Amino acid sequence: MSGIDQEAALHSNLWLGFLLLAVSAFLMATRFRAQRDDASPLVKVLAAVFLAGAAVWLVGGAWTEILLRTHGTVQANLLVASALVAAALLGFVAQRMEWTLARGLALAAQWLAGAALLFLMLLQAELAPVSTDLFATPFLGGVMILAGGGFTAWALMRHGQAAQQRLSAIALGWSALWWLLMVAPTLSNWALAHYERGDYVRLDLQWPAYCLLIAATTPLWMMLAHRLAWPALRWTALPAWALFALSTVGMLIQLHFDSMPGREFWTAFAALWLLSEWLLHSWPRQGWTISPLALRVLHTLRSAGPWLMIWPVAAYWIKLGLEGSHADPAWSRFLPAWLMMGVLAWTIRRVRADAWPVHPVAEWYRTVLLPLGCAWSLLLAAAWNLSQDGAMAPLPYIPLANPLDLTSIFALLLAIAAYRLLEDKLASRRPQLIVVAALAGYGWFNLALLRTVSHYLDVPYTFDAMFASQFVQAMLSLVWSVTALVLMRHAARRQGRALWVAGAVLLGVVLAKLFLVDLSNVGGVERIVSFLGVGALMVGIGYLAPYPADRGGPSQKEAA
């Protein structure tokens, strides 16, 4: 800008001129500052102008020499160091002279250092370069900005005044950004370069390397927050929890698209999960509170995420184990489902004890998470009952002892256990729940009968084949008639009209089925058996299960 030749500038000792200007400006500023009691506002303005000029001359002189004599990483690091030295001097002046403007200029010098380093990194199009030589990167400059901002935040925090506390939070956020976006990625990339033994690394491994570094360093920040009595520093745990959430969602998506993550991703996920456990236990011990909503979200994340991973991970390894064998591939679906149900059963026990891993939000597990898990189990069992025939080679089909019926039984037991957990809340809906459970159980019993017929009489387990089978139609007519008899007999003894009506409705369905479906099998033995059997059962119903009388009155049979 001045037109001076660069070679001449190198031998002109420009730094000395800048230094003299800075010192002179600072002396003038202190002189005007000494007269601050003067009523004229011009004195205060001149003090501020000369102090700002001193800061500009000091930083400008240092940067001029650095830009003339260095380049590359050394230049970037020296630019940051010189600006931070100026910030330290201004901070010292602010403390000794209680000069608010000096404190603001110190903060501005730090932000200027960060802006300069960021500009140089953007020129190279690399915020976190990959290199086996850590000091060949701007890592040192980033560490200096991080340390400067952290020290400033701590020093401002100690004042206790509201304005300083706000500035402390801003400085801490500034440091956190440099740690998360520059220093930590550069350090993790350096470690990854050594892991891969070269400057060219797999881009997909940068994520687990970064997560591992955050998981390893977050406990250090927590211990520092406790040692320095600096509660605001505890919020450095938020990035770790955010990474844990992103890792969980990313791995679930990858797993459910039949892609098994590598060992590096599993290691990073395990490290973040363990860190989350440690944070959930350490925060209350330090007297740091977590809001109830955040606590429920964190528990949902750390419990539901691994639970949902059981299925795809177990299925992957079971498929590998079954390769080359004659076993049914469906084992890779049933065994993971059993594992997930087993985890739900174990969690129910922990909820009753209010112990890890559900403490201190056992109520959240009891009222939301476990009912959702049990509902999933019931829906899964229902879907499989409609689509699977229970055959699981190399095992033979055994009614009620095959994997499909065992899955249904496990789901039913889980539902009963979940109901007991919520019995106080569901007491008013107990009659409706009993009806729903009875209908579901009866539907499962009928499907189990159809699967048994399918296996032992070689009837395909499809709707069309079952509907066309004379034996199946006769069997269903007799089974439903016996069910109606049992219901109506029980209702007659207990004087329960609603149950008797339900049995009568079922008997009406049987009669309609006899004339609309069974009658089409003209001359079939099954048709004859079904008609005779249903007729005999209806006679038995008329004798054994008359319509119940009003409570306290005689039944129809007694009246006769």
Image: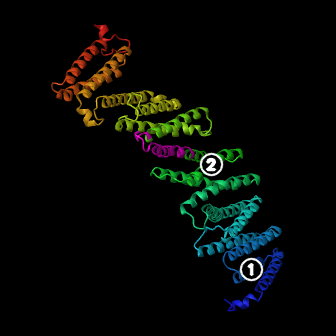
Query: In terms of depth relative to the viewer, which is nearer, 111 or 305?
Result: 305
Inspect the magenta stretch and tell me whether residue 66 lies in it.
no
Q: In this figure, which residue is indicated by the disc labeled 2?
A: 276
Residue at (79, 72) in percent of width and height: 89
Residue at (39, 30) in percent of width and height: 436
Which picture quadrant has residue 451? top left
Which amino acid, mark 2?
A: Ser
Region rendered in magenta: 302-331
Mark 1, other Cα within 10 Å: few <14 / some 14–19 / many ≥20 = many
Mark 2, other Cα within 10 Å: few <14 / some 14–19 / many ≥20 = many
Residue at (25, 14) in percent of width and height: 539
Q: In this figure, which residue is indicated by the disc labeled 1?
A: 62
- Give the side of residue 402 with respect to residue 198, left or right: left
Q: In this view, does 72 lie above or below 523?
A: below
Which picture quadrant has residue 239? bottom right
Residue 353 spot, x, y in % from top left? 61, 32
Which amino acid, mark 1?
A: Ala
Mark 2, secondary structure of its residue: helix
Give the alpha-carbon distance from disc 1 to disc 2, as whole Å.
45 Å
- Give the side of residue 151 with respect to residue 194, left or right: right
Residue 117 spot, x, y in % from top left? 65, 73
Which picture quadrant has residue 21? bottom right
Q: Is residue 432 above or below residue 531?
A: below
Mark 1, secondary structure of its residue: helix
